[in-house]
Amino acid sequence: MLAEVHETVGRITTGVVTSAIPALARVDPHRFGLAFAGVDGELEGVGDWDQAFSVQSVSKVFSLALVLAHDGEALWSRVRRQPSVHRFNSLSELDGDCGIPRNPFVNAGALVVTDRLLGITGNAKAAVLDLLHTESGGGPHFDPVVAADEQAHNHRNSAIAHLIADHGNLHHPVEDVLEHYTWHCAIAATCGQLATAALFLARGGIRANGSRLLSAADTTRLNATLLTCGTYDAAGDFAYAVGLPAKSGIGGGILAVIPGRGVLCAWGPALDSHGNSVAGALALSAFTSITGWSIF
Ligand code: GLN
């Protein structure tokens, strides 16, 4: 099935690699990988599924899971769960919304999540890497070049964080929150590692070692939030075309959860105007069309 999807996607010529982070702008736009990790331990992939790429906003799934695991519902007084209508790094609604971000997957919301994770763990970037590492069985690592490049071009996230802080919704210094956020975005991992690491979302919150990370109810809710917000202002189109809870990142990765069955991770660096991978979205849409494994 994965080979059939690979053939359907072919050689994508639309979309552009992000220019926001110079280290990512140098990635070959024609790379493509797709992996499926099953709840029973099966792992399959095609194309460049074994090549590490920058996970970027896909890391927001893991930081949110860690905060929900510790706090349960408490986070939701600081971040809403509404789909966004502007770009993922927009400031335009934030002031009117009194520094309460729309959802945990736009940059503003993820910064609040990182701030909370910093309060819980004392080291948010290490906590996110550790979760990815433990659940995947090893491999994910920080990419210091990507982290440094983003830190040198971080005006927009810095503005977002300062605005949230001005409204009293950050509990740690802006510089600390930005540093931890940037580093957890700068984790490099392969499609196979990311799909495996996120399996707790397909197993009702159960980790690789059989212990519980999230309650079944929180897992369902996290998946619901991924469906409505995980691909930003394109979430409606994504639900229509793919029908799975998913999280994208500007490195070109998209993680998609098939509750009870497994997790898919697609990677293609060329992005559409919303910041979602063109090849990744096409591959996931082809996969659910072939298998019928959408949540609907
Ligand atoms: N680190 C990137 C940023 O904050 C992540 C954005 C993304 O992947 N959508 O802008």
Image (cartoon, rainbow, N blue to C red):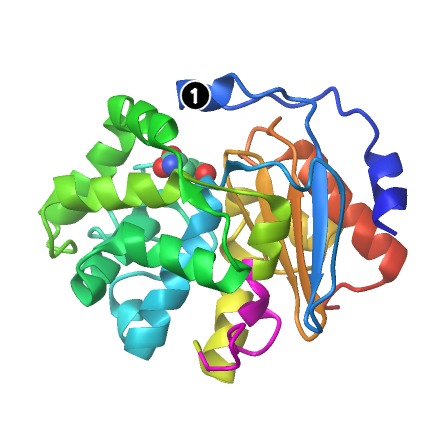
Image quarter for residue 16?
top right
User: Is 234 above or below relative to 199?
Assistant: above
| Residue 87 place in picture, x, y as percent | 44, 36
State which image quarter holds ligand 1: top left
Please give left or right for residue 38 compared with residue 129 in the image.
Answer: right
Q: Residue at x 64, y 23 (%)?
A: 15
Residue 65 in view here: yes
Total count of labels: 1
**Residue 276 covered by magenta stretch:** no
Q: Residue at x 54, y 75 (%)?
A: 220
Task: Identify the residue at the far front of this view.
Answer: 138
- Asked whether 15 or 164 is in front, the reply is 15
| Residue 29 place in picture, x, y as percent | 64, 21
> Could you tell me which quadrant the C terminus lies in?
bottom right
Say which element carries label 1.
Answer: helix
Q: Residue at x 65, y 41 (%)?
A: 50
Question: Mark 1 — residue?
Answer: 23
Q: Residue at x 45, y 62 (%)?
A: 134
- Asked whether 287 or 141 is in front, the reply is 141
| Residue 158 place in picture, x, y as percent | 21, 34
Magenta extent: 197-212
